[in-house]
Amino acid sequence: MRCRKCGAPAVFNMRHHKLALCETHYPEWFLRQTSRAIDKYKMFTSDERILVAVSGGKDSLALWDILLRLGYHADGLYIDLGINGDLNYSARSREKAMKFAHGHPETQLTIVDISKRYGESIAEVAQRKRRGERPCSVCGLVKRHEMNRIALERDYDVLATGHNLDDEAAVLFGNVLHWQSGYLVRQGPVLPADGEGLARKVKPFCRFYERETAAYTLIEGIDYIYDECPFAEGATSLKHKAILTQMDHDAPGTKLHFYLNFLRAKKEGLFCEPEEERVALHACENCGQPTTAPRLCAFCRLWEMSDAS
Ligand code: Q46
Ligand code: ZN
Ligand code: ZN
């Protein structure tokens, strides 16, 4: 197979785009597509400060790399969840994030260590509060709170995450299966700041297949952690991903059209939140972040009964 641009041997073939590219033209295409997505969905401008949530995995490190290449002011945030065990997952993924930051002296990496700051790791707090349950809901809550906290404390305009098309299509699939209209309203490439104390959230990779970000990191030699978090095993979202991947294999582009047609439907007025149904938010008494709960936000309630301050 030959590169569509220059005729050199292709290193990557995208059946859904009917496009094969060589190792020079693939990264160029990837960079251009990211830039287009940023502009198309009006994610941020060149004078805004971006905080990239980095997990040490391929998507978030590729995103950080691309934003720097595109000339944006992008710094990283690594949240150490204290998930270690046999894989030593947090320690190893933290190393990958630090290694990337060392190779890019023009950027900064902020590290938040959850155990040190709040006195318990994600697994410990999940065990105390939601015994027997997977720690992922607690983990998601902690990550959202901490990302928002750092973005606001350090004056970042926007928070960028490395979610790719496989992630977004799987979330959409789950939301549609259960007709979770509230989640469908909020799903999209940009989640506006919508009020005091919340940072705008963007997903510049939402139109890239996971294998496309993997190919970019491979070609560019970005070192990342291959292993998934040990708690991901058996997650429903992974099962949804596998179903969609099978469908895409049989009919290339299925995932992309599923997601893009959802975005089009939203633009045409489906899944929009009526103004009068917006729930009023107020500041949490402890941390100040917006919440619908009467006194403390869900994050602060997590630590209420522990020794953490
Ligand atoms: S890190 Fe956290 Fe994920 Fe691990 S505990 Fe679950 S949510 S699986 S993205
Ligand atoms: Zn080429
Ligand atoms: Zn709070």
Image (tube, rainbow, N blue to C red):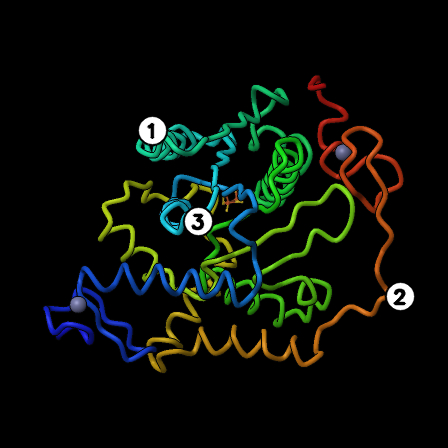
**Residue at 50% in and 42% down:** 53
| In-image side of 78 versus 190 (left or right) | left
CA separation, marks 1 and 3?
31 Å
Q: Secondary structure at mark 1?
A: helix
**Residue at 50% in and 29% down:** 110
- The answer to which image quadrant residue 9 occupies is bottom left
| In-image side of 166 versus 184 (left or right) | left
**Residue at 68% in and 62% down:** 186
Residue type at the position of mark 1: His
Which numbered circle lies on residue 233? 3
Q: Where, quadrant-wise, is the C terminus in this rendering?
A: top right
Q: Which residue is mark 2?
A: 276
Q: Secondary structure at mark 3?
A: loop
Q: Position of residue 11 (x, y in %)?
A: 17, 64
Residue type at the position of mark 2: Glu
Comes first in the chain, label 2 or label 3: 3
Comes first in the chain, label 2 or label 1: 1
Q: Position of residue 47 (x, y in %)?
A: 54, 47
Q: Is mark 2 within 8 Å of ligand 3?
A: no
Q: Is residue 88 visible?
A: no
Image position of 78 with respect to 176: above or below = above
**Residue at 33% in and 77% down:** 17
| In-image side of 203 versus 30 (left or right) | right
Q: Which residue is mark 1?
A: 102
Q: Nearer the viewer, residue 86 or 114?
A: 114
Q: Position of residue 84 (x, y in %)?
A: 43, 29
Q: Secondary structure at mark 2?
A: helix
Mark 3, Cα crowd under 10 Å, few <14 / some 14-19 / many 20+, is: few
